[in-house]
């Protein structure tokens, strides 16, 4: 039985095209994020807030992770860590200013805030739950006095 080589080649090309189309659609869907997260820049915001209070922030780290799935869609996780030399009272003030600014940025970006939280003590902070552009997410900011005498801020944003 003699097979037509052109038919086999066209079938391979079709399968390859479908695989590539599927792969690129997954990559594109993996980069979806809300408008808030597109413009959210905690480093710039904290530097501005710190400068007005005479503080200088040290940018410790930043991380990001994407988790794409066919059934659940794409989840996005970003986190940042910052520190500054100062007293715990200054940390409390910076958290309050930053909370006001994050809320403003959420609302300006068109997000709807569906929940708010605050806590204080050794670990102080705030959180917002929001929805924007078909995505749901939360922002969690925690401040802590470090043993080195510095004050630390950890910021986490999660969207799905």
Image: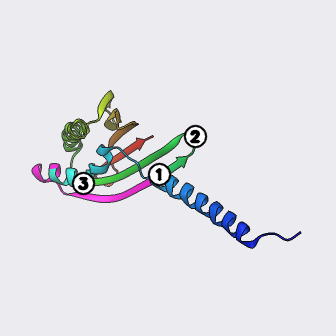
Q: Secondary structure at mark 3?
A: strand
Q: Which residues are magenta?
A: 49-66
Asked where in the image residue 156 lies, by quadrant, the reply is top left
Horizontal side, residue 12 vs residue 17: left or right: right
Q: Which mark is residue 30?
A: 1
Q: Quickly name the residue at label 2.
A: 71
Which label sits on residue 84? 3
Query: Would you say 18 lies left or right of 4 here?
Result: left
The CA distance from mark 1 to mark 2 is 13 Å
Judge by depth and name the residue closer to the eye, 80 or 28: 28
Residue 65 vertical position relative to residue 73 in the rendered view, above or below:
below
- How far separated are the C-alphas under marks 3 and 2? 42 Å
Q: Earlier in the sequence, mark 1 or mark 2?
A: 1
Q: Is any part of residue 158 visible from this angle?
A: yes
Give the crowd class for mark 1: few <14, some 14-19, many >=20 residues within 10 Å. Answer: some
Q: Secondary structure at mark 2?
A: loop
Quadrant (top left/top right/bottom left/bottom right) for the C terminus: top left
Q: Does the CB distance between marks 1 and 3 fall below 8 Å?
A: no
- The reply to whether discs 1 and 2 touch (Cβ–Cβ < 8 Å) is no
Residue at 33% of width from left, 41% of height from top? 141
């Amino acid at each position: 039985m003699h097979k037509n080589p052109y038919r086999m080649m066209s079938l391979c090309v079709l399968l390859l095209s479908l695989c590539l189309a599927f792969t690129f659609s997954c990559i594109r869907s993996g980069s979806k994020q809300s408008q808030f997260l597109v413009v959210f820049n905690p480093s710039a915001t904290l530097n501005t807030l710190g400068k007005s209070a005479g503080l200088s922030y040290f940018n410790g780290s930043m991380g990001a992770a994407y988790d794409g799935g066919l059934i659940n869609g794409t989840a996005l996780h970003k986190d940042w860590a910052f520190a500054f030399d100062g007293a715990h009272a200054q940390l409390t003030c910076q958290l309050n200013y930053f909370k006001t600014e994050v809320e403003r940025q959420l609302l300006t970006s068109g997000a709807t805030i569906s929940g708010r939280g605050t806590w204080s003590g050794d670990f102080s902070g705030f959180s917002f739950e929001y929805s924007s552009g078909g995505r749901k997410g939360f922002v969690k900011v925690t401040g802590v006095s470090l043993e080195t005498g510095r004050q630390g801020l950890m910021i986490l944003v999660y969207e799905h």
